[in-house]
């Protein structure tokens, strides 16, 4: 899946890096994130991307102190 020439991995990496640069304690609400992405993406890609973002190790760690996402 590509958005404007970027792979999903590139989008997740860049988005998380930008978000954490703005706020190191970032812990996006999964429903709000998915809803926002669905404003400009189809629902299936929005859901997939929101799951990837929420489960990014740094963001997951911020949301669930001391835990790590399942692999």
Image (cartoon, rainbow, N blue to C red):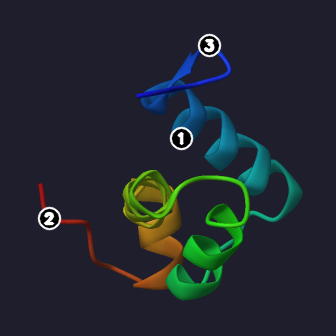
Q: Nearer the viewer, mark 1 or mark 3?
A: 3
The quadrant of the picture occupied by the N terminus is top left
Give the percent coordinates (x, y) of residue 36. 70, 71
The numbered mark, 2 or 1, whose residue comes first in the sequence reads: 1
As helix, strand or loop, the secondary structure at mark 2 comes to loop
Give me the disc on residue 70: 2
Closest to the observer, 9 or 36: 36
Q: Residue furthest left?
A: 71
Q: Which residue is mark 1?
A: 12
The correct choice, above or below, for 11 with respect to 45 in the image is above
Please say whether residue 27 is visible from this viewpoint: no
Q: Nearer the viewer, mark 2 or mark 1?
A: 1
Closest to the observer, 44 or 67: 44
Q: CA distance from mark 1 to mark 3?
A: 14 Å
Disc 1 packing (10 Å; few <14; some 14–19; many ≥20): some
Disc 2 packing (10 Å; few <14; some 14–19; many ≥20): few
Q: CA distance from mark 3 to mark 2?
A: 29 Å
Give the percent coordinates (x, y) of residue 23. 82, 65
Residues at marks 1 and 3 touching, judged by CB atoms closer than 8 Å: no
Q: Which residue is mark 3?
A: 5
The quadrant of the picture occupied by the C terminus is bottom left
Q: CA distance from mark 2 to mark 1?
A: 17 Å
Is 65 on the left or on the right of 21, as rendered?
Answer: left
The numbered mark, 1 or 3, whose residue comes first in the sequence reads: 3
Residue under the point 69% across and 71% down: 26
């Amino acid at each position: 899946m590509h958005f404007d020439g970027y792979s999903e991995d590139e989008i997740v990496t860049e988005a998380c890096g930008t978000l954490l640069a703005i706020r190191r304690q970032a812990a996006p609400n999964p429903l709000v994130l998915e809803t926002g992405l669905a404003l400009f993406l189809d629902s299936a890609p929005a859901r997939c991307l929101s799951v990837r973002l929420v489960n990014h190790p740094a963001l997951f760690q911020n949301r669930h102190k001391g835990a790590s996402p399942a692999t």
